Image (cartoon, rainbow, N blue to C red):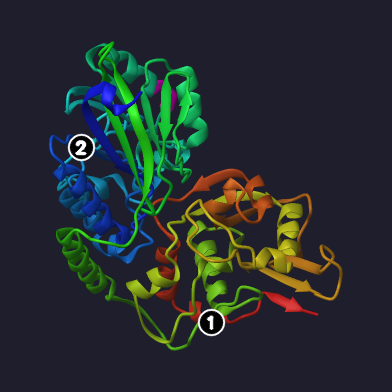
């Protein structure tokens, strides 16, 4: 189908998984501005979630206001939420920041536990006009029910909520568009199992579809991550049967060039406001706390202490890669902790068998593990790093063969029993099998939201004697 055989076109422009890469946002806004300036243009601008990322100081320092202002100035027509919005901000924080949002938040599979209704700042679906077409816009985000429940929300099965919305909207609209922050595998499943969806615009798994996928009568698109590409879909009406048809679906590189001045000015203002907010002093320490990824270090020990204390566990296990740099002596600001521990990762408590603890400790002595680069599930570090512990003493000999190097590991002076289950404070990241895979085998999981690791570090630094304690060795080389 060529554009010459159709008339009345609509251009859908979209972003997904920007993760607060503000450096791309001015150029994206300029590109959108160019499309809107074209004669007889009709442009619908959507964001598919994870626009916000609290690893960025602009977002952290303004609690998302920098992102909302960019969305408003750029002129988005609708957005959905990703897990970075839904799980790293509390519902109250989102309600406050979205109070100034000029477009609707569309997400059908999140409900308040108490009322059973969507939060007042969210719509399950909407109907809007886009050029010559009436569009049913449906949103959904990745379901992490255990996490959302801790925030007072229920994450429903998006397959069910999307199917319900399609059934309600199909006869009212020309086009059904799903804004899916669910990932490509589930997008394929939706296309195969729910009739009536014309277009799925995807995200979450950071997939770049330079050419769209067609599954049955449904087209699937996505534009990668971090604002490196801008998705653009042109829809026309078939002159023979009058039905909407996709003329073009491409992903355009977002290269350096003209930037929207209003967007860039807003980012500059919020960056400075965020910087000032993060300058507040949260602790004072008289000693520098170094961090090492290949061996034990005080800053890593401090993190392990913080997790053990917060989770009220027998012992704690964390990875040093969560910390991106040493902590200097003197006044410690919120921004310094954010800079060194930017990951939106939460603590958790689990029951873990002794044999899985010992296996993980052995892994921690392998260079291919502590120097391993990992990505995803909230991790914003560079390498995995070795394991830092509290509540344990480990005697080891690196000259021995791999997985025979731990001579003895003790909890409160008692050697670990391979068959005993211990209460362990650790990180939610590990429960997904990321990094030290045996740590996902824990039982009786208790996730602890909304506190991040940097919040725990702040509390630990304010605790009498904690800094002195972190200089005591847990790993004793023989």
Query: In what element is the residue under mark 1?
Result: loop
Residue 124 lies left or right of residue 100; in this view the side is right
10 Å neighbourhood of mark 2: few (<14), some, or many (≥20)? many
For the residues labelled 1 and 2, the Cα–Cα distance comes to: 52 Å
Q: Which residues are magenta?
A: 157-161
Residue furthest toward the front? 4
What residue sits 78% from the left and 56% below the top?
417
For discs 1 and 2, the disc positioned in front in the rendered view: 2
What SS does tag 2 mark?
Answer: strand
Q: Which residue is mark 1?
A: 290
Q: Tell me the residue that label 2 is attached to.
A: 43
Q: In this rendering, is residue 224 above or below 21?
A: above
Query: Any mark on residue 82, and which?
Result: none
User: Which of the two residues, 101 or 185, is positioned nearer the viewer here?
Assistant: 185
Question: Could you say where residue 137 lies in the image, as x and y percent from the top left?
Answer: 27, 27
Residue pictured at 53% horizontal, 82% vertical = 290
How many other residues sit within 10 Å of disc 1, few (<14), some (14-19) or many (≥20)?
Answer: some
For the C terminus, the image quarter is bottom right
Is residue 34 at least partly visible in the picture?
yes
* Vertical position of residue 467 compared to residue 266: above or below: below
Q: Is the stretch drawn in magenta largely helix, strand or loop?
A: helix
- Total numbered labels: 2
Of pointers 1 and 2, the one earlier in the residue sequence: 2
Name the quadrant of the N terminus. top left
Picture quarter containing residue 394? bottom right
The residue that appears at 54% across and 66% down in the rendered structure is: 382
């Amino acid at each position: 189908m060529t554009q010459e055989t159709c008339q009345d076109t609509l251009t859908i422009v979209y972003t997904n998984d920007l993760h607060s890469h503000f450096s791309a946002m001015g150029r994206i806004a300029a590109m959108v501005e160019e499309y809107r300036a074209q004669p007889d243009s009709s442009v619908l601008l959507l964001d598919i979630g994870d626009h916000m990322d609290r690893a960025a100081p602009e977002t952290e320092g303004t609690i998302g206001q920098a992102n909302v202002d960019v969305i408003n100035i750029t002129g988005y027509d609708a957005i959905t939420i990703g897990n970075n919005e839904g799980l790293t901000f509390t519902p109250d924080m989102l309600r406050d920041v979205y109070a100034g949002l000029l477009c609707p938040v569309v997400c059908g599979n999140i409900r308040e536990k108490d009322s059973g209704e969507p939060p007042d700042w969210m719509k399950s679906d909407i109907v809007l006009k886009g050029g010559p077409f009436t569009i049913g816009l449906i949103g959904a985000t990745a379901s992490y029910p255990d996490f959302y429940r801790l925030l007072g929300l229920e994450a429903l099965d998006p397959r069910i909520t999307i199917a319900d919305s399609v059934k309600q909207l199909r006869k009212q609209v020309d086009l059904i568009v799903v804004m899916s922050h669910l990932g490509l595998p589930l997008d394929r499943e939706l296309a195969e199992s729910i009739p009536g969806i014309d277009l799925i615009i995807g995200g979450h798994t950071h997939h770049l579809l330079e050419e769209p996928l067609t599954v049955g009568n449904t087209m699937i698109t996505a534009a990668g991550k971090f604002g490196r590409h801008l998705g653009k879909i042109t829809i026309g009406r078939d002159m023979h049967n009058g039905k909407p048809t996709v003329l073009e679906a491409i992903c355009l590189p977002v290269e350096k060039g003209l930037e929207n001045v209003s967007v860039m000015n807003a980012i500059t203002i919020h960056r400075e406001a965020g910087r000032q907010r993060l300058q507040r002093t949260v602790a004072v320490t008289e000693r520098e706390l170094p961090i090492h990824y290949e061996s034990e270090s005080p800053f890593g020990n401090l993190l392990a202490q913080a997790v053990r204390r917060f989770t009220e566990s027998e012992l704690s296990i964390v990875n040093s890669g969560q910390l991106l740099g040493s902590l200097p002596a003197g006044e410690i600001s919120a921004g310094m902790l954010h800079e060194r521990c930017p990951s939106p990762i939460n603590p958790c408590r689990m029951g873990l068998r002794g044999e899985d603890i010992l296996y993980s400790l052995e892994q921690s002595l392998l260079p291919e593990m502590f120097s391993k680069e990992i990505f995803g599930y909230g991790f914003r570090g560079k390498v995995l790093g070795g394991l830092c512990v509290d509540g344990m003493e480990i005697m080891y000999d690196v000259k021995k063969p791999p997985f025979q190097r731990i001579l003895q590991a003790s909890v409160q002076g008692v050697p670990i029993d391979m068959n005993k289950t211990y209460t362990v404070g650790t990180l939610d990241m590990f429960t997904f099998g990321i990094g030290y895979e045996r740590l996902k085998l824990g039982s009786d999981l208790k996730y602890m939201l909304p506190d991040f690791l940097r919040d725990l570090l702040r509390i630990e630094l304010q605790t009498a004697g904690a800094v002195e304690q972190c200089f005591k060795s847990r790993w004793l080389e023989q």
